[in-house]
Image (cartoon, helix red, strand yellow):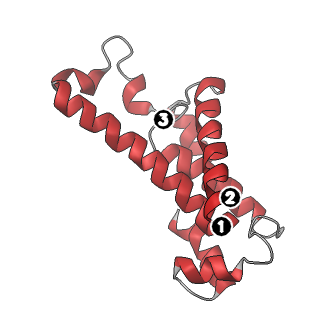
Amino acid sequence: MALVLLGCVFMAGSIHIQSVKLWQEGTFFVIGLAILPLFAVWLISMLAETNRAPFDFVEGESELVSGFNVEYSRGGFALIYMAEYSNILFNRLFTCAMFLGSRDVYMLGQAWVFLFLFLWARGTFPRFRYDILIRLA
């Protein structure tokens, strides 16, 4: 994911998010043809990083009892899921800031679109196997 972000940093000439957003005032990074494949790789790696379907390998190993979640009580279980969903929230807002460079009101709308894409990918795609993920990488 860091290598994909280097494309945005090199185009903007700065590592600061505010500078990247100011550089994108006239256009989005995604509009440029060179960044569009990087954006697709970013979306796939962001989905894989959040350990949600179709990349939920930990959950897929133990279909019946949800494996690692059995050992936690209600507080620990709630903290695990809060951490997963806050990771999704951070990733979608960071994507809007780095690749779409939008203002505050538009960023919230785009963040809702990315949330829909997360949920849509979870419900649409089957779970990958490890060898398919290695081939994808």
Cα separation between marks 1 and 3: 28 Å
Do tag 1 and tag 3 residues touch (Cβ < 8 Å)? Answer: no
Look at 60% across and 53% down and name the residue there.
108
Name the N-terminal-most of marks 2 and 3.
3
The picture places residue 91, in percent across and down from the top left corner, at 50, 54
Look at 66% across and 25% down and name the residue there.
124
Closer to the camera in the image, 61 or 14: 14
Counting other residues with Cα less than 10 Å from the Cα at mark 2, is it few (<14), some (14-19), or many (20 or more)? few
The picture places residue 132, in percent across and down from the top left corner, at 58, 36
**Residue at the top extreme of this rendering:** 64
Cα separation between marks 2 and 1: 5 Å
- The vertical placement of 25 against 83, above or below, is below
The picture places residue 40, in percent across and down from the top left corner, at 70, 54
Q: Which residue is mark 1?
A: 103
Amino acid on which the number 3 mark rests in the picture: Arg
Q: Quadrant of residue 77?
A: top left
**Residue at the bottom extreme of this rendering:** 13
Is residue 131 visible from the viewing direction of this image? yes
Look at 51% across and 82% down and name the residue there.
16
Horizontal arrangement in the rendering, residue 17 relative to residue 83 (left or right): right
Cα separation between marks 2 and 3: 26 Å
Q: Which residue is mark 3?
A: 52
Identify the mark at residue 106; answer none if there is no mark.
2
Do tag 2 and tag 1 residues touch (Cβ < 8 Å)? Answer: yes
Counting other residues with Cα less than 10 Å from the Cα at mark 1, is it few (<14), some (14-19), or many (20 or more)? few
Closer to the camera in the image, 26 or 2: 26
- The vertical placement of 13 against 82, above or below, is below
> Please, what secondary structure does the residue beneath circle 1 have?
loop
Name the N-terminal-most of marks 1 and 3.
3
